[in-house]
Image: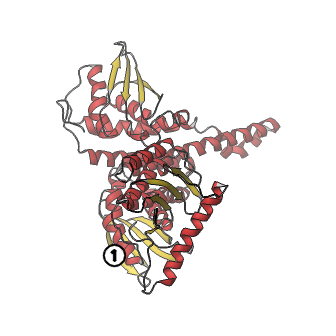
Amino acid sequence: MAGIPFDLLHSQIVKYAKEMEEKRAEAKNRWKEIAESIVDSTEIDKYDQLVKQAFMHSNAETQLESMGYRVGFVLAERLSKDAAKFNTELEIVKFICKEFWSNVFGKQVDNLRTNHAGVYVVQDNNFSMLRTFSDSTQFTKDIGIYLAFPSGVIRGALACLNVQAIVTATVESLPVVKYHLQLAKKA
Amino acid sequence: MSKTTKTGSLVDAKKMSAELFTLTYGAFVTQMLKDYEDPQVVTAKLDKIGFDMGTVLADDFLAKSANVPRCQDCKQIAEVLSKLAIPNYLGVPATVSNWSSGDREFSLIIESNPLTELVEIPDHLKATLNYSQVIAGAIRGALEALHFKVYAVAVENASNTEIRIKLDSILKDSLPAGEDY
Amino acid sequence: MTIYNFYFFNRNGKCIYYKEWKREKHSGISDRTEEFKLMFGMLSSLCSFAERLSTKEGQQVVRHFRTSSYKLTYIDTPTGLRMALNTDPYAAGIPELMKQIYRIYVDTVLRNPLLDTSEKIESELFASRLDQVIIHHSAYA
């Protein structure tokens, strides 16, 4: 399957998440107005639907990240089935940067650094999902929301291999992306 | 691009990217069902999402294939969809069948639809959610970009996915002809 | 050999991109937008008139017209996009070059959700890739 259907789907998901965030903000505002004017507490029940909408999820980024998490988790599960057992945290991160990355994002990462204290910086100089945006700093300020889903994919994949992490992404100039993986200390 | 290393065998990259698509789509539909609860609303959204994707895919398809003849009728449309467009973007072929309405209505049968490959659609949703409607929407969007107004609906049969397509009209802002693109 | 300039119209007839590499003489039309409109009008008329005057049945395709000093190569797509590229009269391989531009447009503009495709193309990536294929084409120089 060519990359374009996925890119288009991802764009649609981002658009959807943004729309839902707007809807929630609207519902929140309306609820605020209503809540201030309510005298009788039994009236609240009438606004069940609105309350539900207003407090359903957090923002668009979080929603995209959690969708990515689920996808990454299952993909890692399928990919690591036949892999040898991992002995160290570093082996797991390497697996993510090589096998996982090339299967999911079409190439291996270009650079991997670590401070040997649980922080890894993974750099992809030509990240598949952002290739079509720009090869300069144009659009970098709007790109954040397009990194939420892939960050979730990476976090989900790590979680599948029993590594809990916080994953954030930074872009200075497209299509270069740096993912910062902050691994939780093992108990 | 990617090599097999000692930690594991390489899964067919093409298959994997299909899995990425399938799983992402599944996560998206799940999210929409949570947000909207009504499966019919979700089906309508999937149709619209497919439509928007289809308008871009039409240009992608034309830009990347050499010498596709301009379709004049439904037979040609069915041919291009089943032999070129669907294999290209969905990764699997489709067969054409069930012609009706004087050759203005037909079905595309997709035997192993990758969208439903890793997904179990719950029984209570089967009647109301057209899970693969995004494909029907994409076909509608792509054909509308080419000035064919169609109706398209995706139905899950027991062993395949059926996209029922009906030509409504040829849209008028018909532009001067060009042949090869 | 030379490639002069390029016009790109969307399905509504709006000029969404214009670029000139070598243009020694200007049209004398003070407003660029007016020139785009006239160019679009001429191409539309040319196509429909060519169809009308045809002595054979079937759709007619306008590919180019040539004067003593330049050639305008034209393509339109079934999705309603139209492009015109002016070159010297004997430049070769121009339709293929224009199809390449079409691909660049799909990859850098239609696939970029941050761009409004009904407006002028604002993608630097489109601009730089277009420049690359033009400048490296054998008809340029």
Q: Count how many numbered circles sit on residues in the image.
A: 1
Residue at image location 45% in from the left, 42% down from the top: C128
Q: Label 1 neighbourhood size at 10 Å, few (<14), some (14-19), many (20+)?
A: some
Q: Position of residue C42 (x, y in %)?
A: 57, 69
**Is residue A157 positioned above or below C112 on the image?**
above
Q: Which residue appears farthest toward the left when viewing the image? A: B6
Residue at image location 47% in from the left, 62% down from the top: B137
Kind of residue indicated by mark 1: Ser
Q: Position of residue B143 (x, y in %)?
A: 46, 67
Callout 1: residue from which chain? B
Residue at image location 65% in from the left, 58% down from the top: C29
Q: Position of residue A148 (x, y in %)?
A: 48, 35
Compared across the picture, whether C100 is left or right of C4 comes to left
In the picture of the structure, the residue carrying the numbered disc 1 is: B97
Secondary element at tag 1 = strand
The answer to whether one can see residue B64 in this image is: yes
The answer to whether one can see residue B129 in this image is: no
